[in-house]
Image: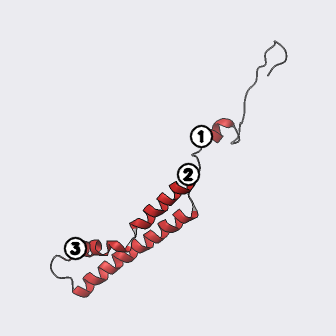
Amino acid sequence: MLASSGYIIGMVVYTGTQTRSSKNSKSPNSKFGRVDLEINKLSKILFVMMVIFAGCIIILDGLKGKFYIKFFRFLLLLASIIPISLRVNLDLAKIWYSY
């Protein structure tokens, strides 16, 4: 802001990363709770275990016939290992507590 009615000629050499435009260009931080991170980690572990169990069943049965169809069949049978209702109940509880 100029106090007089004159003018100033200037040149900006380096503005740095602390300027308003560079601060606003970053992606915003998302809030993700520890419970969500823990449930995601456990779901990944359970999925890997489910694939390993299905693979072990196929190997113990002997790789005869269309074993890849049996593999997907066992994946579907073992899908109840991952509790989808846990995730749904957690999200509903968050909504309830927010009110």
Mark 2 nearby-residue class (10 Å; few <14, some 14–19, many ≥20): few
Name the mark nearer the viewer: 3 or 2.
Answer: 2
For label 2, the SS is loop
Mark 1 nearby-residue class (10 Å; few <14, some 14–19, many ≥20): few
Circle count:
3
For the residues labelled 1 and 2, the Cα–Cα distance comes to 33 Å
Image height of 56 relative to 80, above or below: below
Reading the image, the residue beneath label 2 is: 99
Mark 3 nearby-residue class (10 Å; few <14, some 14–19, many ≥20): few
Q: Position of residue 90 (x, y in %)?
A: 49, 62
At label 2, the amino acid type is: Tyr
**Dividing the picture into quarters, in which one does residue 46 lie?**
bottom left
Q: Position of residue 88 (x, y in %)?
A: 43, 61
Left or right: 20 in relation to 46: right
* Residue at image location 72% in from the left, 30% down from the top: 12
The disc label shown at residue 68, or none: 3
Q: Earlier in the sequence, mark 3 or mark 2?
A: 3
**In this view of the protein, which residue sits in the foreground, 54 or 12?**
54
Image height of 44 relative to 19, above or below: below
* Residue at image location 45% in from the left, 63% down from the top: 89
* Residue at image location 44% in from the left, 67% down from the top: 86
* Residue at image location 16% in from the left, 76% down from the top: 66
Left or right: 88 in relation to 74: right
**In this view of the protein, which residue sits in the foreground, 68 or 6?**
68
Left or right: 2 in relation to 62: right
The disc label shown at residue 25, or none: 1
At label 1, the amino acid type is: Ser
For the residues labelled 3 and 2, the Cα–Cα distance comes to 48 Å
At label 3, the amino acid type is: Tyr
